[in-house]
């Protein structure tokens, strides 16, 4: 009885704990947090100095005793303690003004497809220790499909490619379940690494990760563009050790990322090859949906469509697809029960 009484006062949150960005949906308020998954820690005092946008600004610019880190690698927690502190910071921010003793929030959180029971437990424990009272875990590909309003409950094939920073999740969904899938670590962060490698091998420049990401966003593309794009690449000269700037164009960056883009296309092909014929027929008719921030790469949808001869479209606001899907599950208890796994505080 008391549990039902207190549940009226608690927050209900959807958390997209991504490798690159963390988004939080608060039921009744919408998306309240959208910040980078970056934490700055003072190693002398073990105190967290900054989280999110403020911590990202510190990347590559800190003295030796301040460590800026991304506590998630490929969607999996690599530093449990830092992740817990980061989540506590975000949860405190979203539940400001509420009595935390009376109302530990109910949380639904996304997880990668290729996740073990131990890794699932680590995610749920981090959220519970950060202040949640109940945790439900949903596969990110399913959440993205729901957030993009795909008919996941119907007996039809829905193929979604959720391409984030750390992972590229490819899933065929039907009747509220994942039929065939593939999860790959070749995603947005790997494209950044391709640009860093290109800068070193072809231009003799040491490039930072933040600079590489900016280059990808400004002039990166998967297909040849009608008009050439150029952008200054700034870094440290490999030979002299001095700062240097050179102008690069979109074709150079496209060539640097080509191998990784082909791997993603091949992974989509592999999923289709392992999908039942009836569902493949649906996908051929309905097309493929791209979600996630990395799906915004210029010409990527055209590259996939040309390689597979299947219509491809990018979701509306692909950056928030997962968290919007989690928010929709908070309002649809029946579907929530069908697709989520519940974990409670002991």
Image (cartoon, rainbow, N blue to C red):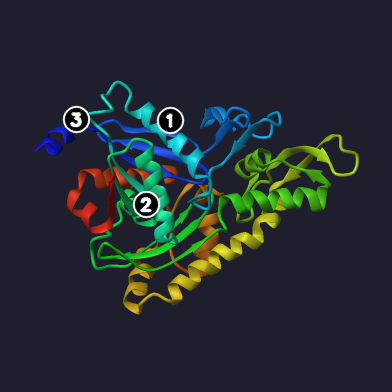
Which residue position is annotated with label 1? 89
- Residue most extreme to the right: 240
- Which of the two residues, 312 or 214, is positioned nearer the viewer here? 214
As measured in the structure, the alpha-carbon distance from the residue carrying label 1 to the one carrying label 3 is: 20 Å
Q: Within 10 Å of the Cα at label 1, are there few (<14), some (14-19), or many (20+) other Cα atoms?
A: some
In this rendered view, identify the residue nearer to me: 337 or 5. 5
Query: What's the distance in space between the residues labelled 1 and 2, CA to CA?
Result: 25 Å
- Is residue 298 shown left or right of residue 35? right
The answer to whether one can see residue 225 in this image is no
Whether pointer 1 and pointer 2 mark residues with C-beta atoms closer than 8 Å, the reply is no
> Is 262 placed above or below 218 here?
below
> Are the residues flagged by discs 1 and 3 in contact, CB closer than 8 Å?
no
Q: Secondary structure at mark 2?
A: helix
- Asked whether the residues under the numbered discs 3 and 2 touch, taking CB atoms below 8 Å apart as contact, a structural biologist would say no
- At a point 43% along the width and 46% down the height, the residue shown is 318
Query: What mark, if any, has residue 165 been given in the picture?
Result: none
**Residue 341 pos. (x, y %):** 29, 55
Q: Which residue is mark 2?
A: 144
Q: Secondary structure at mark 3?
A: loop
Q: Residue 9 got which mark?
A: 3
Viewer-side label of 1, 2: 1
Q: Residue 242 placed where, x, y %?
A: 86, 34
């Amino acid at each position: 009885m008391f549990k039902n009484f207190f549940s009226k006062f608690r927050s209900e949150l959807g958390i997209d704990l991504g490798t690159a960005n963390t988004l939080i949906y608060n039921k009744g308020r919408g998306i309240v947090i959208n910040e980078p998954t970056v934490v700055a820690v003072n190693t002398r005092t073990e105190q967290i100095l900054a989280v999110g946008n403020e911590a990202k600004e510190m990347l590559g610019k800190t003295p030796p005793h301040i460590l800026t880190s991304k506590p998630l690698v490929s969607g999996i927690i690599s530093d449990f303690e830092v992740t817990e502190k980061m989540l506590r910071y975000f949860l405190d921010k979203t539940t400001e003004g509420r009595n935390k003793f009376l109302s530990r929030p109910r949380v639904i959180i996304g997880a990668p497809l290729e996740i073990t029971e131990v890794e699932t437990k680590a995610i749920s424990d981090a959220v519970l220790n950060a202040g949640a009272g109940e945790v439900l875990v949903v596969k990110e590909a399913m959440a993205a499909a729901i957030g993009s309003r795909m008919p996941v409950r119907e007996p039809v094939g829905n193929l979604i490619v959720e391409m984030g920073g750390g992972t590229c999740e490819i899933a065929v969904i039907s009747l509220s379940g994942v039929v065939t899938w593939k999860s790959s670590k070749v995603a947005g962060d790997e494209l950044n690494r391709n640009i860093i490698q290109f800068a070193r091998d072809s231009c003799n420049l040491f490039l930072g990760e933040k600079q590489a990401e900016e280059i990808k966003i400004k002039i990166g593309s998967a297909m040849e563009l009608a008009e050439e794009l150029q952008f200054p690449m700034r870094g440290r000269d490999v030979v002299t050790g001095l700062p240097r700037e050179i102008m690069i164009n979109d074709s150079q960056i496209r060539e640097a990322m080509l191998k990784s883009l082909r791997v993603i296309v091949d992974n989509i092909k592999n999923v289709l090859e392992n999908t039942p014929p009836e569902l493949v027929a649906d996908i051929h008719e309905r097309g493929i949906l791209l979600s996630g921030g990395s799906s915004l790469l210029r010409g990527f949808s055209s590259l996939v469509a040309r390689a597979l001869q299947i219509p491809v479209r990018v979701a509306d606001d692909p950056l928030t697809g997962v968290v919007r899907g989690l928010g929709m599950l908070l309002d649809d208890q029946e579907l929530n029960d069908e697709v989520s796994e519940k974990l409670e505080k002991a």
